[in-house]
Image (spheres, rainbow, N blue to C red):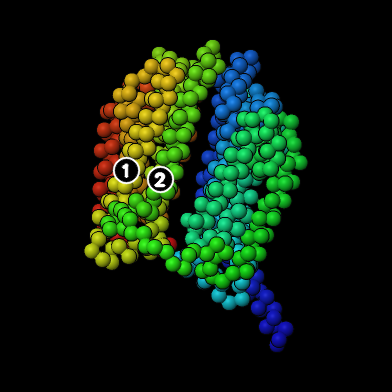
Amino acid sequence: MAATTLVIDSKLARGTKSVIRRFTFRRVLLSASLFGLFTAIESVAQSAGIIAAYPDVAPRARFIHGLASNGALGLFYGDSHVDIISAGGYMDYRILPILSLVLAIWSLMFITKMLRGQEENGRWELLLTGDTSATSATRDTVVGAGGGVLFIFLVVATVLGLSSKSPKLSFSFSSCLLYSLTIVGGAAISIGIGTIASQLAATRRRANLYGIGILLLFFILRGIGNTIESLAWVKNLTPFGWIDKLHPFVGASPVWLFPTALLTLITCSLGIWLAGKRDIGESFIADSDSAKPNLRLLHSQLGFGVRQTRSVLGGWLFTSVALSALIASIDKTVAKSMSSTNGVTKTLSNLTGNSAAHIQIAYLSAASYITLIILMMVAATGLGAVREEEASSRLDNFVSGTISRSSWLSKRLLLLEGSVLAITLLSGLAVWLLAAGQGIHTSFAAVVLGGLNILGPIAFLLGLGTLLYGTMPRLAVIAMYVVAAWSFTIDLIASAGTINKYLADTSLLHHVALVPAAAPHWESFILLTLTGLAFTALGVLGFQRRDLEAE
């Protein structure tokens, strides 16, 4: 009888572990699919785009080496001391570092949500009922999250493998596998970093700050090693430096996978061990037992919303302004490299919609494109934060009093729209000032005020998300990401060549004029904005009438 009981208990323990792993994997699968497809499509688009724009090797070499000669780009691009002329080599140089950082941040945000986030909202206690310990539950959560990283690897490897059949690309199967493994290396390490941060911090927000701070430090060290020749050895100390040194397509060095795997194992093991050394609700870096009350912005619902979202929205603002400033600061360098190449001129003409624009003005308009992509992310993540308030039941604290649902949602949307407007204006102002400083003559009205026409698609996207949020809240944010990804993919294809007009019109980005190369499309702006506002009004009405849906 005792032996039978032991066997049953063993099966129950294994079943509990399996449940936690499956639960985590199901939670990560959708976002892993989206990020995997985005990573794969963006990688192939970069390599195919450079070959389409520069079919001849000589002009391609002039353009790429012109970029590499600007040391500032080493902060974002990869190692320029190897062959970066081929499609694969350019992909290693141009897109691998940024995508590896994006996946690392995504991985960090997910694991802190599943660990410290669930502990904050009380669900972690349910997982620890019975014989499940904090150590085993954390371990199984890490394994489930690792399954999401593995899924991204499979998606990227599959898409690259299919694209390698193109004679213009001619990727080897081993190079595709190594590239896919390299690009998820940062995400794997981030699982360990996020696990440790979840034990150190008392809240998920603070855990994210700890983890993102470490990732940015690693990325900055890599950039220092790229831009300062005498400090190239610094890249040996950072995971993103190891990613640079792997060179999947040109002169591959798989040996750098070893420190990546070792650091992943060490950080994950340390985080799991720390999870078993503390009580639920506690943290190794504890909050102060007493603190002076900080009541700023807490006297109104709108002020509370500002306080809750200011760090995230401030981060998006900094990112948009910084990238716009970078594009404007290297405008002359890039324009000089592209001036003799018809392929790139044609691509920029398709992108901006103005074939007569000077190459400097056309490239300057890329800042508007980057800002538009960022604003789409701001809209999607902003509505995601709104949904999180409801899913975590924190919304109940507001609507149980005198604040109506429609008032709560309207003010959160107003805050989001105001942030989008501020990002657009300040990014445009940065571009105009830096362009003027280089002697590139553009008018303030064309760059800053004309740039407001990119808000039309954002109003439509946010309105669509709000409409779905008011009726099918669990699908709202997913649909926004799908629309944004579709728009970006279709517009990327359209900029590289001809595409069916009706298919091109399905992209929100296709209805925007990129200033200052082209005059603003105010008709499209008005139509998209009014449609978005109508969707928003219907969404707010639907939210007022439906039941609240917790996670």
Residue of label 1: 417
- For mark 1, give the secondary structure: helix
* Earlier residue among tags 1 and 2: 2
Q: Are marks 1 and 2 in contact (CB under 8 Å)?
A: no
Residue 545 location, quadrant: bottom left
- Identify the amino acid type marked 1: Glu
Compute the Cα span from label 1 to label 2.
11 Å
390 up-or-down from 173: above or below: below
| Residue 363 visible in the current orientation | yes
Looking at the image, which residue is at 62% across and 30% down? Answer: 227
Instruction: Answer with left or right where residue 539 lies relative to residue 369.
Output: left
Looking at the image, which residue is at 45% across and 29% down? Answer: 325
Q: Residue furthest right?
A: 255
Q: Residue furthest front?
A: 292
Could you say which is closer to the camera, residue 185 or residue 240?
Answer: 240
| Residue 467 visible in the current orientation | no
Instruction: Answer with left or right where residue 420 lies relative to residue 63.
Output: left
Looking at the image, which residue is at 34% across and 51% down? Answer: 306
State the quadrant of the C terminus.
bottom left
- For mark 2, give the secondary structure: helix
Locate residue 521, reporting x and y percent: 31, 26
Locate residue 332, reporting x and y percent: 49, 18
Residue of label 2: 313
